[in-house]
């Protein structure tokens, strides 16, 4: 199964008020494994960015002034997502903006939902954790997904983090770990290094060995159990057998 985890950044909150997309980020997942393929594009929205939106993602008018228009990249974007299941956090927001951009190109352009199926992680999280906070940051905390790099919102970074959250939330961390190992073997590099970096940062496990007094107390306890069972304890029989067979 091919899935594409997707996020966008915009000039504001409402496409009906003329707001536009300024960044698209998407990562590919096949059979619950990150493939390392991604789509990332900044866009010139042909309008100013609201101050409130700029405070969230940090993208300025000057930065996007020389970026391509959505019309110039629409074909490549649609080719990347076509036929996939889109994984989006708060899907109506991103789909609303994407479909608005497509309608600006062609009033009769079919919506993204006609090319892809959609899984909304926010709706899923609300059903799974009713009455709790289910923002992406809250889910990272709940599922122990590293989001320490997320000082500002960014479409590609948020898509990568959402992929971690989705895989953990819907099936455990194992699938993501296997995906990284496969990517290392097949491509000679990691598709994402967050889990391994976290493991590398942990101190080595402390080895605590039993003292002579503790070993003696343990033997006394085993002997008491052996007496109470009238010699029927399996470990004593195994120990004696190994002792007899030793050279």
Image: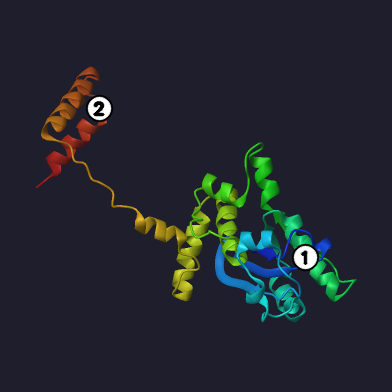
Look at mark 1 in the image and give the residue it sits on.
19
Residue at (66, 36) in percent of width and height: 131
As helix, strand or loop, the secondary structure at mark 1 comes to loop
Q: Residues within 10 Å of mark 1 (few under 14, many from 20)?
A: many
Q: Residues within 10 Å of mark 2 (few under 14, many from 20)?
A: some
Q: Is residue 9 visible?
A: yes
Residue at (60, 71) in percent of width and height: 38
Among all residues in the image, which is located at the extreme top? 228
Residue 25 rendering spot, x and y as whole percentages: 63, 68
- Is 237 situated above or below 194? above
Say whether residue 129 is left or right of residue 245: right
- Is 155 situated above or below 90? below
Residue 227 rendering spot, x and y as whole percentages: 19, 19
Q: CA distance from mark 1 to mark 2?
A: 76 Å
Which quarter of the picture shows residue 196? Answer: bottom left
Name the one closer to the observer, 73 or 3.
73
Residue 100 rendering spot, x and y as whole percentages: 82, 66
As helix, strand or loop, the secondary structure at mark 2 comes to loop
Among all residues in the image, which is located at the extreme front? 51
Between discs 1 and 2, the one toward the N terminus: 1
State the mark number for residue 233: 2
């Amino acid at each position: 199964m091919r899935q594409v985890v997707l996020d966008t950044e915009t000039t504001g909150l409402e496409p009906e008020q003329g707001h536009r997309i300024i960044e698209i980020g998407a990562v590919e997942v096949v059979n619950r494994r990150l493939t390392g393929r991604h789509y990332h594009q900044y866009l010139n929205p042909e309008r100013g960015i609201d101050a409130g939106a700029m405070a969230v993602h940090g993208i300025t008018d000057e930065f996007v002034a020389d970026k391509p228009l959505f019309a110039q990249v629409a074909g490549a974007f649609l080719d990347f997502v076509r036929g996939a299941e889109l994984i989006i956090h708060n899907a109506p927001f991103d789909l609303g903006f994407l479909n608005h951009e497509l309608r600006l190109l062609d009033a009769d352009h079919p919506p993204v939902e006609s090319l892809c199926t959609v899984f909304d992680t926010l709706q899923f999280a609300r059903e799974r954790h009713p009455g709790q906070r289910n923002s992406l940051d809250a889910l990272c905390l709940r599922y122990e997904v590293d989001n320490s790099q997320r000082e500002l919102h960014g479409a590609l970074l948020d898509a990568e983090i959402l992929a971690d959250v989705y895989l953990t939330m819907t099936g455990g961390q194992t699938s993501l770990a296997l995906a990284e190992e496969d990517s290392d073997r097949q491509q000679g590099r990691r598709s994402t290094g967050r889990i391994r970096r976290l493991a590398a940062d942990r101190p080595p496990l402390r080895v605590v060995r039993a003292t002579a007094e503790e070993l003696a107390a343990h033997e006394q306890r085993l002997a008491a159990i052996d007496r109470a069972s009238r010699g029927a304890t399996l470990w004593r029989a195994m120990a004696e057998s190994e002792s007899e067979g030793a050279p």
